Image (cartoon, rainbow, N blue to C red):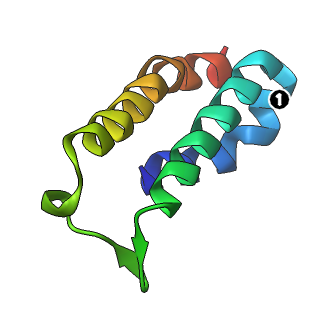
């Protein structure tokens, strides 16, 4: 997710001009995922996957999935 976030941040100024709704949607979805990840922080990293409850894994998976479609539209929105 870090790579996708970095790509988005680099393209965000162009995306805000070409598709501000997509830019806002991605910003909100990345923020929601980061907020959830922060709850599982430990030191400089995060708790191990096998330490998460099934509900926590499902929530993280749903947040990652929610980024899938808007991220797939990022390149087309910037290039067109």
**Residue denoted by label 1:** 16
In depth, the one of 55 and 15 nearer the eye is: 55
In the rendered image, residue 4, in percent from the top left (x then y), is placed at 47, 45
Q: Does residue 51 sit above or below 24 in this rendering? A: below
Q: Does residue 21 sit above or below 10 in this rendering? A: above
Quadrant the C terminus occupies = top right
In the rendered image, residue 9, in percent from the top left (x then y), is placed at 67, 49
In depth, the one of 60 and 14 nearer the eye is: 60
Q: How many labels sit on residues?
A: 1
Q: Judge left or right: residue 33 versus residue 23.
A: left
In the rendered image, residue 66, in percent from the top left (x then y), is placed at 46, 24
Q: Judge left or right: residue 20 versus residue 80.
A: right
Q: Residue at x 82, y 29 (%)?
A: 16
Spot the residue most to the bottom. 43
Per the image, label 1 sits on a secondary structure element best described as: helix
In the rendered image, residue 7, in percent from the top left (x then y), is placed at 55, 47
In depth, the one of 22 and 46 nearer the eye is: 46
Q: Residues within 10 Å of mark 1 (few under 14, many from 20)?
A: some
Q: Residue at x 57, y 16 (%)?
A: 76
Q: Residue at x 46, y 21 (%)?
A: 72
């Amino acid at each position: 997710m870090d790579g996708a976030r970095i790509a988005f941040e680099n393209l965000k100024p162009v995306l805000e001009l070409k598709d501000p709704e997509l830019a806002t949607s991605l910003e909100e979805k990345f923020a929601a995922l980061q907020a959830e990840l922060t709850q599982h922080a430990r030191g400089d990293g995060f708790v191990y996957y096998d330490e998460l409850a099934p509900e926590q894994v499902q929530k993280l998976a749903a947040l990652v999935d929610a980024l899938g479609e808007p991220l797939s539209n990022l390149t087309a929105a910037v290039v067109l």
